[in-house]
Image (cartoon, rainbow, N blue to C red):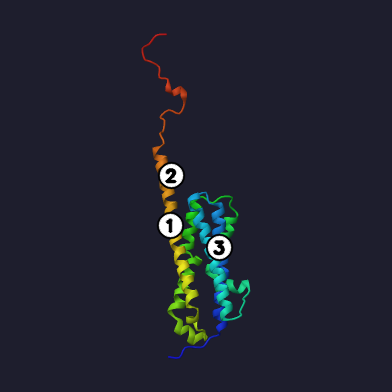
């Protein structure tokens, strides 16, 4: 079966746009780290921000090694429309907040997980690149085996980020459980008014 030949520019554009997306993702996690009320996850959020910035540079550099395509921002938005939309929407939401509560952070992580977050998307793309090298070479004329090391490193880094996100979600859940325990353990006084503490003795004459 003959595969339809396609321009290698499409592929270099994809790498470049994935790099641009990871730069936005880095900004999102930096904002979350700066505004979260949970100090126990701040360092992990900063690690995610730094890691995404590193992936961004690696992907854009990889794009330059394969070709010289530098798409405009609007082109990347169209190519990665669902993922870009989610990331940009979350950045705007977080920028409007002075602080990010544990509940806010939990919702954001769930949105990234189930509504098209870039971390899982990039992981799937990297695995596809490694698995379909022969087909990609035939269609685009690009020998991805020459870039195996870089793509494998990116896939491994993203896998570490997925584990980090799971650990953050676990810490959020632990924080919520601790708060619930505190609420249960706080004593509740039957009488809130001091006047109610004094009960007149029946049958006593003044």
Percent x, y of residue 26:
55, 63
Judging depth in this view, the residue of 165 and 92 nearest the camera is 165
Looking at the figure, which quarter contains the N terminus?
bottom left
User: Helix or strand or loop: what does disc 3 sit on?
Assistant: helix
Percent x, y of residue 94:
57, 56
Q: Residue at x 63, y 74 (%)?
A: 72
Dot 1 corresponds to which residue?
Answer: 167
Q: Nearer the viewer, mark 1 or mark 2?
A: 1
Q: How far apart are marks 3 and 1 (CA)?
A: 18 Å
Dot 3 corresponds to which residue?
Answer: 26
Asked if residue 102 is positioned above or below residue 87 in the image, the reply reads: above
Q: Distance between the residues labelled 3 and 2?
A: 30 Å
Whether residues under marks 1 and 2 lie with C-beta atoms below 8 angstroms apart, the answer is no
Judging depth in this view, the residue of 33 and 195 nearest the camera is 33
Asked if residue 59 is positioned above or below residue 40 in the image, the reply reads: below
Dot 2 corresponds to which residue?
Answer: 179
Q: Distance between the residues labelled 1 and 2?
A: 19 Å
Percent x, y of residue 59:
55, 73
Percent x, y of residue 108:
50, 58
């Amino acid at each position: 079966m003959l595969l339809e030949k396609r321009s290698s520019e499409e592929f270099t554009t994809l790498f470049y746009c994935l790099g641009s997306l990871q730069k936005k993702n880095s900004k999102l996690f930096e904002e979350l780290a700066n505004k979260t009320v949970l100090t126990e996850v701040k360092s992990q959020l900063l690690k995610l921000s730094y890691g995404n910035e590193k992936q961004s540079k690696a992907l854009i550099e990889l794009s330059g090694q394969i070709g010289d395509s530098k798409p405009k921002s609007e082109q990347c938005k169209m190519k990665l429309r669902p993922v870009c939309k989610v990331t940009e929407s979350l950045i705007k939401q977080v920028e409007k907040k002075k602080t990010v509560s544990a509940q806010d952070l939990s919702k954001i992580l769930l949105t990234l997980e189930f509504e098209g977050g870039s971390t899982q998307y990039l992981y799937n793309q990297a695995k596809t690149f490694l698995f379909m090298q022969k087909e990609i070479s035939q269609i685009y004329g690009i020998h991805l085996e020459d870039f195996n090391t870089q793509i494998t490193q990116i896939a491994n880094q993203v896998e570490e980020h997925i584990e980090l996100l799971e650990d953050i979600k676990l810490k959020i859940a632990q924080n919520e459980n601790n708060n619930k325990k505190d609420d249960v353990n706080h004593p509740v006084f039957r009488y809130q008014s001091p006047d109610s503490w004094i009960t007149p003795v029946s049958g006593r004459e003044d």
